[in-house]
Amino acid sequence: MYELGVVGLDTSHPAAFAEVLTNCTDATIGAVWDGGRIRDSDYVDEFCAEYDVRQMDDLDLMAESVDGAMILTVDWTRHVPLATKFLSVGVPTLIDKPLAGDVGSIQSLKAATKEAPLFGGSAVPFHPKLTTLPDDSTKRMVFAAGYNDFFYYRTHLSDTVRRLAGSPWITVERTADPGTTLRIIFENGVHSMIRCDGRADDGTFAVLDVTDDGTHAIEIKSGESNFANLYRPYLESFIEVIRGERDDTETLLDAASLGLAVEAALDTDEQVEPDDELLTNVRMDSESFVDSYEPYY
């Protein structure tokens, strides 16, 4: 049984992940650290009691005692220093989306992954309806739409199309189409369009995958039961990483870079490429978002 350490109880994800792992025979949450930015001490105590988890104040000690770490803080500017404590000592580490808010942080993560693999990002692309799409088709075009038009949520879409494309991105540009819409091209010739400003009260992610082999339309609704369909394969994949059966590090780092490229394209109305100064200039501040953040539950 693998023991996982949770770093940050800010969002609804720790409790949702704990519920999934309750029925898992391969892994369990064994330790929790929380910085107190979003949740109060009563919540932390209740979480630890409900899921039979020990609370730890020292991340270095946690890194010595767990088989995998999950960095779940809502503040993406803290992800790299927190994750590095685990990666640097060989602990496979999951980082919730978005991984980082600037290129320098992504480069720091890449350096840290020399010691251990990285996993994480959005769970949306792990929905079974998406993971079973054929990935060897030609002339592929992927359309994706989401909601909550802000960096923290737009990464659901950039992460999803990057995983579906299965190849590094080469260009991103805003289009003249309605709404917050961007065109993304990948090295293997896959083209994608994403629209980020769907209605929040509708709470729907949608993907239209068009290839020479056919057309597939997938709709993913919000809600705890639907999210469980994402979290279960997401966590199962992380366990595979811990076992040494898969390594998503390069995909994850490229997806993080793509998320920043989306922000650069929206900010400048220019086409963005991986080596552009436009990309290195992106600095996504988290302070105001974290100050106003409220967990779903």
Image (tube, grey):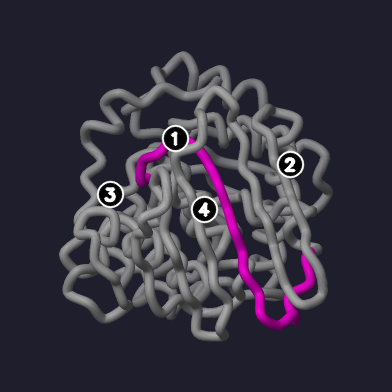
Q: Residues within 10 Å of mark 2 (few under 14, many from 20)?
A: some
- Which amino acid, mark 2? Leu
Q: Is residue 169 left or right of residue 13?
A: left
The residue that mark 4 highlights is: 157
Residue at 68% across / 27% down in the picture?
Answer: 223
- Which amino acid, mark 1? Asn
Question: Given the current orientation, which residue lies at the most extreme top position?
Answer: 42
Q: Which residues are magenta?
A: 133-151
Task: Tell me the distance, in whole angstroms, between the alpha carbons under discs 3 and 2.
Answer: 27 Å
Q: In which quadrant will I find the C terminus?
A: top right
- Give the percent coordinates (x, y) of residue 14: 57, 35
- Give the percent coordinates (x, y) of residue 123: 61, 50
Question: Sequence order check: which comes first, mark 2 or mark 4?
Answer: 2
The residue that mark 3 highlights is: 77
- Give the percent coordinates (x, y) of residue 284: 24, 50
Q: Quadrant of residue 281?
A: bottom left
Question: Sequence order check: which comes first, mark 4 or mark 1?
Answer: 1
Of labels 3 and 1, the one closer to you: 1
Residue at 62% across / 36% down in the picture?
Answer: 204
Of labels 1 and 2, the one closer to you: 1
Q: Using the image, tell me which numbered label, if any, was put on residue 148.
A: 1
